[in-house]
Image (cartoon, rainbow, N blue to C red):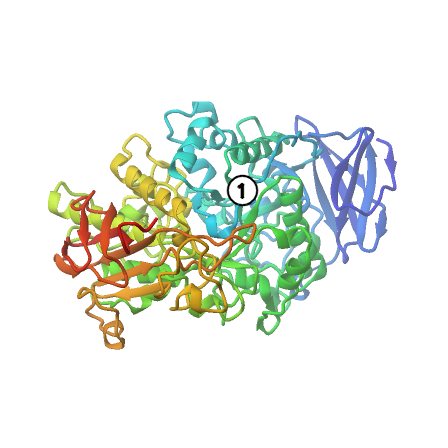
């Protein structure tokens, strides 16, 4: 092979018509070889003799797209000082655009002499010289060429967004209308049948669980299981090869792009759940796959040189305090926006990304870089605002323009519908946008991602079907998964034919969905909840790549699907449910100098008012009554504060939304003037009052566990 000096930038493998340039940052290495593999697995080692600014580089003629490669990096082996170089271990390129091949559990993948009984108890300070190449994925040379002509990013405003968290594989593996050869792949997700479900449901963005190339944890492989969720990243630039229907020699890159383009054509944004807090290499007893053998002391936070800081619960923590590690993360993010056309990111354990040596730092380099970056600052950014380290719970602590998963919304909604005497005070705060968390730093209500279920925990169906977790299939003696789930089995553990129990469950599910989808903020639906998906009580299916996790489309609850579509359609049709400004408790005509609407005066009443069962406004004692099981909110369509894109006032109808979480019916008095003179039902979660209208002051019986949405009219001639 003809070898030229090449160049130090860009990092990774860059292909042109003559060959490929290879560049790897490794400041403490003494030598770096790039190993090229043919179709039979035979390798050719090519030394990279040039080093510029700690970047080892070289250009190899004749290497084109689809070529497989890896790095061997030599240097000092002194684990007590954080140095774990070992040229016998083939390493994945951190900047590889695609990976090929499986991670196979063999003793050779460890940097120390691990035995078949596991790494525990073995000495990680002794170097193992077995060759790991046959057992680890290979990097693939990819040329970023794709016809993006006609691709139009939806760029939907946050306030109009409805998120749908889903898994590429689990969404289509059992879909009868998706061809078998496409199920569980990017192509399957882009299939018209899959897209049609999303568009007919009314969601505006899919939040994909990890699609960066991941591998299974050593512990799972030893138990005969595999990683399903994907929170164990190995390749931050590479779409997961297992999600490709067309092979893994780089074709997964094109297939991912085709999926994104199909979603955009349907008006749906693509948001990626990304895992930059840790890698697949685990702690000092984990395998050597990439970062550990390239620059262990730079990529990871270490304790006493040898041991790994573990703020993530997965064995290691990426060190974004190092410039090149921070560059890896931000380069990856920009790549997915500019080359793969994604529309935003949800950051797993985002508090970890902000940590310095002294703890969580709100002035961290990561937040500063993202804030000033002309690409990243323009996409949707969602934080999971916690990690497992000290001080890691940071709900409400991320700066603009970040939004956050709001677990206080989740817990308050569950407590109201499922846990009895919780009162309504917390629920009211969450329904109205969580101003206590987000208003103080200038953020808007859409900083709150409102959800009641997600991938982590019970499905919505299981939340009301099981009191206890049933995780035996995970082979951890049911010790894994959260124990406190704010759930209720409605009087019977598991599935039942008892119609009374099932009626309660159906009502609780519809109440929870209504609460989430009609709240101020950004609702997020977990995939399959709209059709009654069950995991049979397993609340931690991270290692269940089977029918326990995959959506069962054949047994879909079509009545629940229809109800979910109706609630989302109601939200989409009426801006009063998706306001971009916090409520003030006053009329628009009299607050902040805002003029009254152009056609018709303001209602002259509060933009948001709260009522108890007696039809009177909530008092302080009512808010503090932990026995309260009924809460109504009146949203004024004539007092919406945000303006349209051309500065026009937004005027909508006014609505009274009533939630009753009690197990017995209750009589609710409809508020009279000045709130309304007449009410018309537009949504009833129980179906008992569909199409009904009442005058103000009427007494309405609310069934147990019911949600009621009524259009409130002030007079017969009001438009």
Nearer to us in this view, 58 or 131: 58
Q: Quadrant of residue 82?
A: bottom right
Query: At x 86% / y 36%, what residue is drawn?
Result: 3
Q: Position of residue 158 (x, y in %)?
A: 50, 52
Query: At x 73% / y 38%, what residue is drawn?
Result: 35
* Left or right of residue 480, residue 156 in this image: right
Q: Position of residue 129 (x, y in %)?
A: 66, 48
Helix, strand or loop at mark 1: loop
Q: Give the labeled residue for mark 1.
A: 211
Quadrant housing the N terminus? top right
Q: Is residue 464 visible?
A: no
Query: At x 50% / y 31%, what residue is drawn?
Result: 190
Q: Would you place residue 186 above or below residue 284 in this image?
A: above
* Left or right of residue 710, residue 49 in this image: right
Q: Would you place residue 228 above or below residue 613 in this image?
A: above
Q: Position of residue 426 (x, y in %)?
A: 32, 67
Q: Position of residue 639 (x, y in %)?
A: 41, 60
Q: Is residue 267 visible?
A: yes
Nearer to us in this view, 661 or 519: 519
Q: Would you place residue 408 above or below residue 646 in this image?
A: below
* Left or right of residue 443, residue 465 in this image: left
Q: Quadrant of residue 656?
A: bottom left
Q: How many marks?
A: 1
């Amino acid at each position: 092979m003809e070898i030229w000096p090449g160049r130090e930038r860009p990092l990774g493998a860059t292909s042109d018509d003559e060959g490929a340039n290879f560049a790897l940052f490794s400041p403490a290495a003494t030598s770096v070889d790039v190993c090229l593999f043919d179709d039979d697995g035979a390798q050719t080692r090519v030394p990279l003799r040039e080093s510029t600014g700690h970047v080892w580089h070289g250009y190899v003629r004749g290497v084109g797209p689809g070529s497989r490669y890896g790095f061997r990096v030599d240097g000092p082996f002194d684990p007590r000082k954080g140095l774990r170089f070992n040229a016998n271990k083939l390493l994945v390129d951190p900047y590889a655009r695609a990976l090929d091949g499986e991670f196979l559990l063999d003793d050779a993948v460890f940097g120390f002499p691990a035995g078949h009984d596991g790494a525990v108890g073995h000495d990680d300070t002794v170097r193992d010289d077995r060759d790991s190449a046959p057992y680890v994925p290979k990097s693939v040379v990819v040329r970023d060429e794709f016809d993006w002509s006609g691709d139009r990013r939806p760029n939907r405003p946050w306030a109009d967004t409805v998120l749908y968290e889903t898994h590429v594989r689990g969404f289509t593996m059992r879909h009868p209308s998706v061809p078998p050869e496409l199920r569980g792949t990017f192509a399957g997700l882009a299939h018209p049948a899959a897209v049609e479900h999303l568009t007919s449901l009314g969601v505006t963005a899919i939040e994909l669980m990890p699609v960066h190339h991941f591998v299974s944890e050593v512990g799972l492989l030893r138990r005969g299981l595999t990683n399903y969720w994907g929170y164990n990243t190995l390749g931050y630039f590479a779409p997961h090869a297992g999600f490709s229907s067309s092979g893994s020699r780089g074709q997964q890159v094109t297939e991912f792009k085709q999926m994104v383009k199909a979603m955009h054509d349907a008006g749906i944004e693509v948001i990626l759940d990304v895992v930059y807090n840790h890698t697949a290499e685990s702690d000092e007893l984990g395998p050597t796959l990439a970062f550990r053998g390239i620059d262990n002391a730079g990529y990871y936070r270490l304790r006493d040189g040898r041991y790994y800081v573990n703020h993530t619960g997965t064995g290691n923590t990426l060190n974004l305090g190092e410039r090149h590690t921070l560059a890896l993360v931000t380069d990856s993010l920009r790549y997915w926006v500019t080359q793969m056309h994604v529309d935003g990111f949800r950051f797993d354990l985002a508090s970890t990304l902000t940590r310095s040596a002294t703890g969580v730092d709100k002035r961290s380099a990561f937040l500063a870089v993202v804030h000033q970056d002309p690409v990243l600052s323009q996409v949707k950014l969602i934080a999971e605002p916690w990690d497992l380290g000290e001080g890691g719970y940071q709900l409400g602590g991320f700066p603009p323009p970040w939004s956050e998963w709001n677990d206080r919304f989740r817990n308050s909604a569950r407590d109201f519908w499922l846990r009895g005497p919780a009162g309504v005070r917390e629920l009211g705060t969450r329904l109205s946008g969580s101003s206590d968390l987000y208003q103080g730093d200038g953020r808007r209500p859409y900083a709150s991602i409102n959800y009641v279920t997600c991938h982590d925990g019970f499905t919505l169906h299981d939340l009301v079907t099981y009191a206890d977790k049933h995780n035996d299939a995970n082979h951890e003696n049911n010790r894994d998964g959260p124990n406190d789930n704010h759930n209720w089995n409605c009087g019977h553990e598991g599935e039942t034919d008892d119609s009374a129990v099932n009626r309660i469950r159906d009502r609780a599910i519809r109440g929870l969905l209504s609460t989430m989808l009609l709240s101020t903020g950004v609702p997020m639906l977990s995939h399959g909840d709209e059709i009654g998906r069950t995991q049979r009580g397993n609340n931690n299916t991270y290692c269940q790549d089977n029918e326990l996790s995959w959506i069962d489309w054949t047994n879909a609850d079509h009545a629940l699907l229809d109800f979910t579509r109706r609630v989302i359609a109601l939200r989409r049709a009426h801006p009063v449910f998706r306001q971009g400004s916090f409520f003030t408790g006053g009329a628009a005509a009299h607050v902040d100098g805002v003029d009254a609407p152009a056609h018709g005066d303001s209602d002259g009443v509060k933009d948001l008012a709260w009522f108890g069962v007696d039809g009177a406004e909530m008092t302080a004692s009512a808010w503090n009554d932990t026995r309260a099981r009924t809460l109504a909110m009146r949203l004024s369509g004539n007092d919406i504060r945000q303006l349209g894109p051309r500065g026009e006032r937004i005027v909508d109808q006014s609505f009274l939304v009533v939630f009753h979480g009690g197990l017995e019916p209750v009589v609710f008095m409809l508020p009279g003037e000045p709130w309304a003179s007449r009410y018309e039902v537009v949504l009833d979660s129980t179906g008992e009052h569909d199409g009904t209208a009442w005058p103000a002051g009427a007494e309405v019986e609310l069934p147990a566990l019911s949600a009621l949405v009524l259009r409130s009219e002030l007079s017969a001639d009001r438009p």
